[in-house]
Image (cartoon, rainbow, N blue to C red):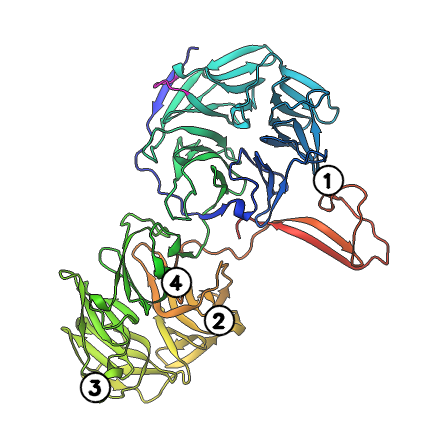
Amino acid sequence: MKGSVFLVWLLLSLPCIGQEGYRHLTIKNGLSQGSINTIFKDSRGFVWLASQEGLNRYDGTNIKVYQFIDEDSTTIGGGNLRGIVEDANGDLWIGSGDCLNRYNRKLNNFTRFYSNSSKRSTITTVFYANKQEIWYINEEEGVVALNYKSFQKRKIWRDFIYKADYLSGKVKKDPVLPIVWILLPKGVVGYNYQTREETILSPKILPNPSNITSFEVDSEGNIWGVSASQLWKYSMLSKQVKSFQLPNLRGIKPTTYDIKESSDTKKLVISGNYGLVIFDKLKERVSRYYIHQMNNTRSLSNWEISTAILDNQQILWANPDPVGIDVILPEHFQINTFDSNPCDFGEFNGASIRGIAEDEEHNLWVGSIDEGLWYIKMNPERNKGLEEPLSLQKFTTKDGLPDNDVNDILIDANGIVWVATFLGMAYFDKQRKKFIPISNHGDSNNYVNANYVLELCNYKDNQILLSTMSGLFLLKNKQITAFSRDREPGSGSLYYDSMAQRLYVGWREKGMAVYSTKAEKLVLLPKLFLPGLNVMEFYKQPKTDVLWVSSNKGLVKFDAKKLQILHAFTNRNGLINNVVYATMPFRNYLWLSTNKGVAQFDLSKEKFKAITQEEFREYNRNASLMTSNGTFYFGSTHGLTYFNPTILPSTHSLINIYLTDMAVNDKPLAIEKGHIGEQDKIVLNYDENTITLSYVGIDYQN
């Protein structure tokens, strides 16, 4: 065949691994088998997964398995299931190792169609459906179009010899021309069933000839195929071939198993022994890729992806053969934990986190109660919201810490890491790679309380303020001196307003004290504010006099100029929990960590937004951080969580509702014909007035 060839090399600066949410379905979740031949999403929103061990229907929560039962003719045919299509009636057609099968949706059962009167097994693959016909291919009949209304058959390619390895991914109907395309050893063969002519797209037409392992016919009639690391596009109109170099994601000889056009027809989903590649048809470049990472549940479960689809909700469904199904949700708000990263963090994932800081090299220092402190080396090229730890090192009293109970971590203007513990202070010596303890002798009458350091705060002239159980102290040049005379036990909360020259201090279970630092000596304002509150943290809203105060009795809006409460927000105002530990700003929102999960507060509307969370964790004070790449961290009583604040949580989503059962007057409703979920109407008597409906919400995103 003659034609022109264009070679296009993809840029090496590929996009990073997707930041989407991941779900993994295995036989533990109810799948009949981990190897899936076909993934299909129907008009009702169900996802159907065809395997050798039956047909699986998934609704986002439950998996229902339909399997062959020899003595029950209303079950699906046996053997390997091959291809799924949906007709205009909403019924599904599935090929199997025995026969052609129709799933009768209204009856919730199957009808088998054998190719011979003896009901001898005939390997069948279904690959196309329109308003009148379904198209299939089998060993005895070749390529056939079946009118599912009249049950008349049309022989499309009667002399074609079928082989069992021609699965639905390798047989396609051209949407523009009267051609059926099939992948054969000699290449992609197109049979024009009107002229009975054949078109052969062989590897010889490619710039670097090699075997074609998979192909797709897109909605415009273009033929796409993969040979080794080449993706190519053939136009039947121009007779031209364009070739694109695919990335080598795994570093081995690539083999592509399947190509599928996305539901919106804008992309190609390419799967193989290297993971997943998403190719943008309009921009003609790779837009995204997905790989497997050991011990990382936010990656593919396996390198070997046999087939994948991108559905109408932009959800990726992939079969990491033979593990099951990976569901990759589009980028959405998600609170993540570090136990989903490729490091064995051991007890770190269950530790009570207190104290988080990021150093000059963008690595993390994370403290805990009882377990000491961890240094987490991060990938310096990580993107926002996608944290990638490379290694983890633990420090305890053996490494110089005064105590394994950490209260706070601070990195000063010189890049020195300071740690506050129950038994004193310490700083990290980079050369000696250990912590050097510093004792506080500023209160000779109560040495223990003076060294019970609750929080650290940067102060003027590169000094550090210490909040302790014996009042305030000042750290300068690695020497600690008394800073206040009141000796009030702190609550672990400090905020220094350098513009107003005021220091705000939480007094343990008493309220908030305010100091003026304008004079040489510290001056305590005579009034105690927010009486009875245990103050956790402060945030001064820019260009305003508003000071937001986190406390054990909600979020307080405080006028820092007039020194008065403007409003107190509690669970009566929609706050998820009244114990608020941390307040972190982003754009026009405050993010709060509480005793019952994460909350979001709209500053302009002064209203809380509900946040969908897989787990409503109990968080800790002194355990919040926004890193240099914009990721938010909150430390909880059992591990460290993080999320990307640029993705706003959705407050609602539309889902499909499918009725599964109905009872009238506490008795199951008897329906003469059909399934309750497929009824147009149900007529009841006047006295049948107590109705119970059972349904499933088909939801894959929440």
Foreground label between 3 and 4? 4
Residues 236 and 471: in front is 471
Residue type at mark 3: give it.
Answer: Asp
Residue type at mark 1: give it.
Answer: Lys
Tell me the CA gap for discs 2 and 1. 47 Å
Nearer the N terminus, badge 3 or badge 1? 1
Q: In the displayed structure, would residue 21 be above or below residue 531?
A: above
Judged left or right of residue 64, residue 258 is left
Tell me the CA gap for discs 1 and 4. 49 Å
Question: Majority secondary structure of the magenta segment?
Answer: loop
The residue singled out by tag 4 in the image is 350
Whether residue 459 can be seen here: no
Residues 587 and 416: in front is 416
Counting from the top left corner in percent of width and height, residue 265 is at 51, 33
As helix, strand or loop, the secondary structure at mark 3 comes to: loop
Nearer the N terminus, badge 2 or badge 1? 1
Nearer the N terminus, badge 3 or badge 2? 3
The residue singled out by tag 3 in the image is 443
- The circle on residue 577 is 2
Q: Which residues are magenta?
A: 206-211
Judged left or right of residue 187, residue 542 is left
Residue type at mark 2: give it.
Answer: Asn
The residue singled out by tag 1 in the image is 106
Tell me the CA gap for discs 3 and 4. 36 Å
As helix, strand or loop, the secondary structure at mark 1 comes to: loop
- Residue 125 lies in quadrant: top right
